[in-house]
Each structure stands twice: as C-alpha cells, then as structure tokens.
Image: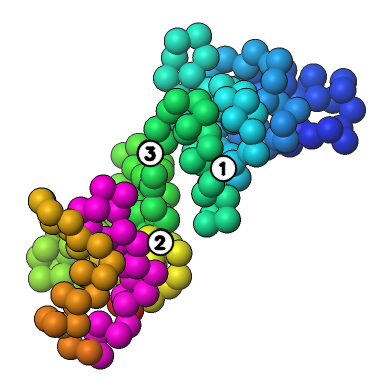
Amino acid sequence: MEVMHGDIAQNQREVTIKRFKEGKFQVLVATDVASRGLDIPNVDLVIQIEPPKDTETYIHRSGRTARAGKSGTCITFYMRKTFELIQKIEDQAGIKLKRVGIPQAEDIIKASSSGILKNLRDVNEDVLHLFEDLAKVLIDQHDGNAEKALQVALAYCSGHYKQKLATKSLLTGQEGQTTVQMSVQKGRLGSANCYTILKKFWDPRTSDQVRNMKAFKNGLGVVFDIRS
C-alpha cells in the first residue's frame, strides 16, 4: 500500500502512479489528486470514505475503475448527515446506488477467512504425515465428526475463536442490537401501524425496546432495531 496527496512532490506522485500501474502494490490511498486526468487500467475497486459534495467529483472518483469497457465496483461510505449527498448524486447522475448495510461480524470473518484456503494450497504434502496423529486425536475429540474437527481447526487458524460473535445493528452499527424487517405484500404498513401491531402482539418488555424505526419509501414496511 502507498499514499498520494497534494503535499507529495509531483515527481514522487509520478513514481507512485507508475508503480501502481505495474502492480508493485495493490492498494493506493489517495485524495482527489488521483481522481482526474490519470489513465490507470485494471483498477477493479474504488472506495470513497465519504460522498463528495458535487456529482461531477463522484463520477471522476468512481471512474477510476471499470476503464475501457471493463467492470468494476465503487463503494461509498455515508452517514445520516451525508445521506442527502447520496440522494443528490443519484438524482443528478441518473443512477441508482445499491444500499448495503453495515456488515455483521460473521460477514467480516467469512470475507477475511477466504484467504485461508489460498494459503492451504501452499502446504507441501511431504509435511502432512507429521500431523496425522494430531488429526486423528482432533477427530476423536469431536466424536468422529471430521467436518466439525476441520471447522474447529479453521476457526483457530482465522483467529476468531475465543468468544461468541456480537450482533450489530444494520442501521447504526451499534453492538447488541438486531435489525428486524416487517413488511406486507399489499396495502400499506408505516411506522404507526407497526408500533400498533408490536404493542398488540409482543410483550411490552420487548416492544418498548424498539429503536430507530424507519419506513420504506414504497409504504410496504419498516425496519427497526431491537436489543439482541
């Protein structure tokens, strides 16, 4: 990974871009100095840490990927206070951005653990016999369930094995909260209707814990948080 911004000398910036084009490193962290006038092929992912205030800048930033007819992905992080900028970009650019909620801990683990399989391909078969007895012991410890024994070994390799995963709100990212969706196929279901239903059918100790309720634009449902 290397960085590039306006305080770096022009000649050093050129060296950085050249190295990035040649694949000498995989990640370039940059300000808008890298958003215009640079032809960098084979960029398949652009991440914007916040949406820009003008649509043209968004187009130039996201345009660093999917060059020359190729496909690519642009991810833009936003918060409640910057959500209006996302809506402005959609309206002015005539596009529809896909909303993705805050990833849960299990999503992050699955994504980060995918590299384990790649590393396992590098294991030389000549050393496998050294672990034969240990493999048998591990399987015996799990009542002969080889699949569970392998899951335990992979969990240990990933580093995520000591504690139960905490759930997070898909709306706010707050730990200990679970996001629930309630929807209908026809008619309308807004926040007021949802609260009425919850108070009628749920225990008050549960319904009173509902937080951050938001209605769908199409009127067919709501999402809300509740303590896990």
3 or 2: tag closer to the N-terminus? 3
Q: Residue 138: which quarter of the image? A: bottom left
Residue sitting at x 57%, y 25%: 59
In terms of secondary structure, where does tag 1 sit? helix
Q: Residue 164: which quarter of the image? A: bottom left
The residue labelled by disc 3 is 98
Task: Tell me which segment is drawn in magenta.
Answer: 205-226
Please state the horizontal and vertical placement of residue 224, each as a whole percent of the image: 32, 67
Marks 3 and 1, how far apart in space? 15 Å
- Mark nearer the viewer, 3 or 1: 1
Which amino acid is tagged 3?
A: Lys
Please determine whether, in this image, residue 125 is positioned above or below residue 105. Answer: above
Which amino acid is tagged 2?
A: Leu
Residue sitting at x 53%, y 18%: 42
Please state the horizontal and vertical placement of residue 215, each as a whole percent of the image: 31, 59
Marks 3 and 2, how far apart in space? 15 Å
The residue labelled by disc 2 is 171
Please state the horizontal and vertical placement of residue 80, each as a whole percent of the image: 52, 57
The residue labelled by disc 1 is 85
Residue 193 appears left or right of 223: left
Q: Is residue 224 magenta?
A: yes
* Residue 156 in sight here: no
Observer-nearest residue: 50 or 153? 50
